[in-house]
Each structure stands twice: as structure tokens, then as C-alpha cells.
Amino acid sequence: MGFGVFIHRSDSIYDDSPAERYQFPSQYLSRVEACVGDWIVYYEPKKVAETRGYFAVAKVQGVIPDPTSADMFLALIEPESYLDFANPVQFNDTNGPVERGVLNEQGKISGRAQSAVRPLSPSDFQRIVALGLDDSAPLLPRNGSAPALLGFEEEQAPFQFEEQRERATFTVSRIVRDRVFRGIVLRAYDQRCAISGLKLINGGGRAEVDAAHIRPVEAGGPDIVSNGIALSGTAHWMFDRGLISLADDLKILVSRQVNDPDAVRAFINQSGQAYAPLRGSERPHPHFLNWHRDNCFKQ
């Protein structure tokens, strides 16, 4: 087992769903198999407009042949392991590439940096994830000292790239996941309630909206921004109880079981459409919206 980097583009031709699966050709099979049971970092290449760089972490559960495409395989992502970074990490910092393993013996970027799947040293993994999960923005809850972001436990001698692999374990607590999820969702929605369209900031600089999971974590919903929506307290209460939902085109649906439909319609955005993130990949995914309509929404 070992850490790795998976390159993913938001406009990918591959059948990728980063929180669920990663499609790849057979040439990368051995590299992906080396990551089974361990963590990988997703990277969006610099050629993508407004690239996110290293943008998420996930754990590879297994690898299977793709039943729909010959000579292709699927890396299956462990449920509930996926986590978008609070701060996407760019390829370079002031000291050069944050992924030191792409450098050759002369300190230059090697062809390894172009590989869609490549191994990642524990030290590079820890550096990238620490940067990605570090978030002290004021929209996050202010509850005293922040919890430790990472849990690493070394088991062997120092890591040597491609010769001797240091074993390590990595965990992210639910507290940290909730903080990071809140951060990425509220940033995507500009701290604005998707249902009412209101943006309210209290005197302490904290946004008065919640980051709600469309498909709850308890029901297998991942901590991915497309499974999130920014909601005020009232909207969150109605959404969780199935009194409102969203169509795939983000039209706001109101249940016929609400006791005062006129009051609800006066509360929601007058356009009847939910406020949506500008970036397409951050909009609520139809897969999650369909789950909410089928399992929560009271017709």
C-alpha cells in the first residue's frame, strides 16, 4: 500500500466521480493497485482554467475492471473517505513544487509530473494535506482552539522515494470534516442561503447559514461540495424534514404538506430558483438531489 496522486479534470473524458470512482486505462493498473487500502490526493492540472491544483483527499477501497469499457478499470473510493480541501493547494509554493517527488536528481521537474497516476511520499502527502485542510477563515465556527487536523503514526524508518516506503496511517476527525465541509460549501455559495437568497453576517463576521448535506452522512452522503447546500436555519429545518427540495434544474419544490404554503413561498427566492455556485462542478449534483426527493421530500 502507499499514497498516490490521481489527476482529475472537471472536464474529463473519463467516467470519473471523485467521491465514488476513478476510471483509468490499464497502463496505470499497477500504480493504482499499489494505492489500494491507502489514501490518494486528487490533482487538477495547470492546463485547466481556474485550476484547483491539489483539491481533495480520498481512500482507495479496491480496483475492478470497468464493466462498460474494455481495457479500462475503476478505482473504487471508500465511502465517506472523500474530503474536498478547504484550501486547494497549487502545484508550486515559494520553495518550488509542494510535491517534491516530481523533482529529479538535478532538482528539475521530471516527466513524472505528467503521469495521471503516480506514487506520493508520506512527507509530500502530509505537506499537501496539511496545507489543504488548514482553514482559519472567519466564516468557520469560533470555538476556542482548533482541533489537530492530521493524525499520522509512523511505523518504520524514514521514507525513501521508490526504494523503501515508510508506512503511515492517516485520519481526519468528524469535527475537522464538519469544519472543512462548512468552509467549502459557504465559499461556493458566497455565504448566501440558496433558498432565500439572503446573505447575513453577524457582528463577529460569521455567516448565519449552515452547510447542509443533501444526502446525509448517516445515509452514505460524502463530504463533497456538490453534496452540500448553504441554508439558513429555517431553510435547513424545512429541507431536512422534506418540506422543500430541489429539482435537477434547481427549481425550489414546496411540499403540499406544509401548513402555510403562502408563508413558505414568501420566504423562498422570488425567482423560484435556488441560488447556485458559479462553478459548475460545485452545483448540487442530480444524483444527490434525486436521493433527497426520493427519501426526504414529502410530495
Image (cartoon, rainbow, N blue to C red):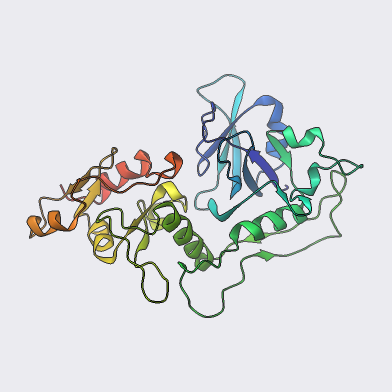
Q: Is residue 156 left or right of residue 5?
A: right
Q: Is residue 187 left or right of residue 195?
A: right
Residue 262 in the image: state x and y as whole percent.
7, 56
Furthest-right residue in this view? 106
In terms of depth relative to the viewer, which is nearer, 77 or 109? 109
The total number of labels drawn is 0
> Which corner quadrant of the image does residue 133 belong to?
bottom right
Left or right relative to 201: residue 90:
right
Q: Residue at x 35, y 51 (%)?
A: 214
* Residue found farthest to the top: 70
Instruction: Tell me what residue is drawn at x 24 percent, y 45 percent.
Output: 273
Q: In the rendered image, is residue 58 in sight?
A: no
Q: Residue 216: where, in percent of width, then height?
A: 37, 55
Residue 7 location, quadrant: top right
Whether residue 233 can be seen here: yes
Find residue 163 and report its horizontal and vertical position in percent. Answer: 88, 45
Residue 277 pos. (x, y %) = 39, 47
Q: Is residue 58 above or below residue 14?
A: below
Picture layout, residue 66 above or below residue 281: above
